Amino acid sequence: MTAPLAPAPERKGWLDRLKAGLRKTGSSIATVFTGTQIDDALYEELEEALLMADTGVKATTHLLTDLKRRVKDSKTTDPAAVKGLLADALADLLRPLEKALVIGEHTPTVIMVAGVNGAGKTTSIGKLTKHLAGEGAAVLLAAADTFRAAAREQLGVWADRNTVEIVSQEGGDPAAVSFDAVTAGKARGKDVVLVDTAGRLPTQLHLMEELKKIRRVVTKADATAPHEVLLVIDGNTGQNALAQVRAFDDALQLTGLIVTKLDGTAKGGVLAAIAQERPVPVYFIGVGEKLEDLETFNAREFAQALLS
């Protein structure tokens, strides 16, 4: 059997940052395995630690059942070894979330990006633009977050940094801007059109209707679009992030997630809750503010970083 390839130096540096970002959760779970025996008390402590990490009741129950089966099958008696088995169980639970963002099946590939204010949506679009441009894709940005003047300016800054074109109009109708951008993307032979929609709370029903309208109008500009509908969620918001995934998925039929701010106070366990209850693929996760701080999601890496 060949040994697994070591990650590239950049990836390793990024993994170290991810581990640091998830340290708070990791250390609270790790203390559970410092005892001398595997007993009911250990599982009770672990249940509490997982719930505190925003894993949610369903995913916690699933993980504990799976873990007990693995402990029994492997005849493990060492609590420290149980941590490795938990990492395996978590990686298996998260694996359905692993999926690559594919560009090129449609020209342009139209990607709609939604998210509540403060989740890091516009910043994530900037990072995603850098990622796509780095792979040789010609990107056009659509500033359809017309309610927030600052959002247009912010997206303009990202466009300049990434040297890509942007379609924007002051105070315009978000759906109209989106339509113009998709039409322009087709005419200019762009590979990707990224549509920045207005930040909103899923409880603001009139704004959710506006998002549905953008989706409908994009389809008028290109019958096959949108090809991807992404939601940006803040890794610090815990179970609230799961509620956002549910609400936006119901309204827009999400194809993928970008999870931001997995540094500092992020608990990280919410990805397990999403995998258990609403398994929308996680295309990227972010651990900082820099352009390169967006990386593809790998279930095994994430499980190991969380429990390291």
Image (tube, rainbow, N blue to C red):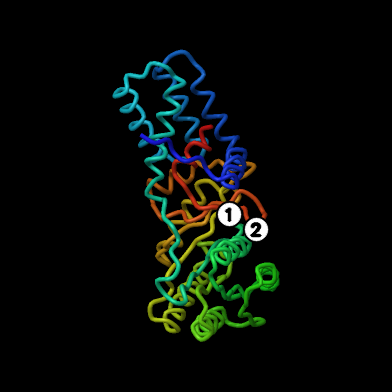
Which x, y percent locates residue 272? 44, 43
Which x, y percent locates residue 25? 56, 35
Q: Is residue 37 left or right of residue 8?
A: left
Few, some or many residues within 10 Å of mark 1 (<14, 14–19, 20+)? many
At a point 46% along the width and 62% down the height, the residue shown is 248
Please, what secondary structure does the residue beneath circle 1 have?
strand
The residue most toward the front is 2
Q: Are marks 2 and 1 in contact (CB under 8 Å)?
A: yes
- Residue at numbered disc 2: 291
Which x, y percent locates residue 252? 43, 67
Residues at marks 2 and 1, CA–CA distance in whole angstroms = 7 Å
Give the amino acid type for the residue marked by disc 2 in the picture. Answer: Leu
12 up-or-down from 106: above or below: above
Which x, y percent locates residue 150? 70, 70
Return the residue nearer the eye: 74 or 234. Answer: 74
At a point 43% along the width and 78% down the height, the residue shown is 216
- Residue at numbered disc 1: 294
At a point 54% along the width and 62% down the height, the residue shown is 115
Q: Is residue 66 left or right of residue 226?
A: left
Give the amino acid type for the residue marked by disc 1 in the picture. Answer: Leu
Few, some or many residues within 10 Å of mark 2 (<14, 14–19, 20+)? some
Please, what secondary structure does the residue beneath circle 2 have?
loop
